[in-house]
Amino acid sequence: MSRLKKSKFKAAKLIEIADELRNPERGWYQIHTFVLSDDITMVDREYTLNNMDTIALLLIDISDYKNAPLDDEAIDKLRMIFSFFRDYRLGMIVRVVYDTNGRCMENEPSNEEQIIEHMTQVSRVLKEFESDIYICQGMLIGNWGEMHSSKFLSPSRLKRLSNAFREELKDTTFIAVRRPSYIRILFPQGEDLRQKEVGLFDDAIMASPTHLGTFGDLSSKETIREHSWKPNEEIEYVSRLCDNVPYGGEALWPNEPDSLDNVRASLKEIDKYFAVLHISYLNRIHDARFLDHLHSLTWKEKGPFRGLDGYEYVGRHLGYRFVVRKAVCSLLPNEDSILKWEIEIENVGFARSYFESSVYIEADDEFGERKKIDVSEWIDLTKIASRSKHKFTCMTEKLYGDVYLSATKASTKESVFFANKELGKNVDDSYIYLGYFKK
């Protein structure tokens, strides 16, 4: 009889919970606006933060520098702003803009060289905070930095700006552009859906079937690849693209009835729509009409979310949401001291986790010493697609007593919480209890 049978592992009953989880790089966000030429102070700004947010959008207006490089004072202000949000452990979505009033043609530089110089200057500061920068939205251009109405959006100009920005920010952060068609301009066919550096931001989600021009009116067969396609084709494209890169922005209420009315009317249909798009983050303030509508809806399906209002339901599913479904342990064949673990994890969120995680199993060794074993080599949370399960196999030394599983974002050590009921004792609540070895 093996030693494992003498010290049998008793798996815990793994119960899914509906609690809000404060996990990095996902969820609701608020916008924090700065005019870089103004006197900027961070005094008392902490009172504007929501303590459940893990991300924040920083809208940084540099319009007063449209004809000159950023000076040392402006660079120091950027560092001060980024330091504040880093200290409050908020992943930063950064949008540097020339326009905040819908008149980009008046406020943008007259030439690309000035834009590229600003990109280079901003990128150097972003690199200093790379572990805390989530996404850099836009190319500085367009009304409100949303990449529309600008004279710099021809394919050739967009490619030049993108190449410069991507080269500066390489391996630092995700970049996001405003339309799926821009991705097809920037990348050759095939590479566009494989790349993992440029995602999408969409500030008109569900405002109309085309998301107010984010998508087009013609099918891909009626127009060229670099133009916008009709909604059903673009949504299919976004679903494939944003399995690798983040997508998010603002959801808006329509000004008149349209073909999405049946989707908006049902929380179950909104859930499906957001899951297909793989939405990771949304503005918690705008559009109030859409958010109020979510509050009026209720999740009616069986499970832990039954009875939850739509705003709370959507918020809990933005991005990834991991649930441990099963943990099985056995002795490795022909070994007396190596355990083989099979751990099944489901992602019930709208999107993947896009960052590297560190995953640990913790218990006592044979001498009663607490052991925290890094199993990240075997358990890669980025492998779990949205609305799917993944079974991981990993090995550890022989363990005894209560066993726990935990995870962190590797670059910042922030906890990644699992949506399981906590049954453990005297441990940090980011750990979940897998079971115990009965001696």
Image (tube, rainbow, N blue to C red):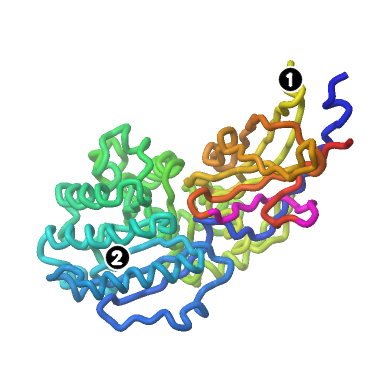
Q: Main secondary structure of the magenta part?
A: loop
Q: Nearer the viewer, mark 1 or mark 2?
A: 1
Crowding at mark 2 (Cα within 10 Å: few <14, some 14-19, many 20+): many
The answer to if 420 sits in the magenta stretch is yes
Residue 41 as seen in the image, left or right of residue 320: left
Q: In the rendered view, would you say 396 is above or below 228?
A: above
Q: In the rendered view, would you say 33 is above or below 129?
A: below
Q: In the rendered view, would you say 50 is above or below 205?
A: below
Q: Position of residue 183 (x, y in %)?
A: 30, 45
What's the residue at 24%, 40% (across, down)? Answer: 223
What's the residue at 22%, 58% (across, down)? Answer: 120
Q: In the rendered view, would you say 159 is above or below 240?
A: below
User: What is the secondary structure assignment of the residue under circle 1?
Assistant: loop
User: What is the secondary structure assignment of the residue under circle 2?
Assistant: strand
Q: Is residue 427 visible?
A: yes
The answer to if 107 sits in the magenta stretch is no
Q: Quadrant of the N terminus?
A: top right
Which stretch is magenta?
413-426
What's the residue at 49%, 48% (across, down)? Answer: 278
Residue 346 as seen in the image, left or right of residue 159: right
Camera-nearest residue between 250 and 294: 250
Camera-nearest residue between 11 and 29: 11
The residue to which callout 1 is attached is 335
Q: Is residue 253 visible?
A: no
The residue to which callout 2 is attached is 96
Camera-nearest residue between 308 and 333: 333
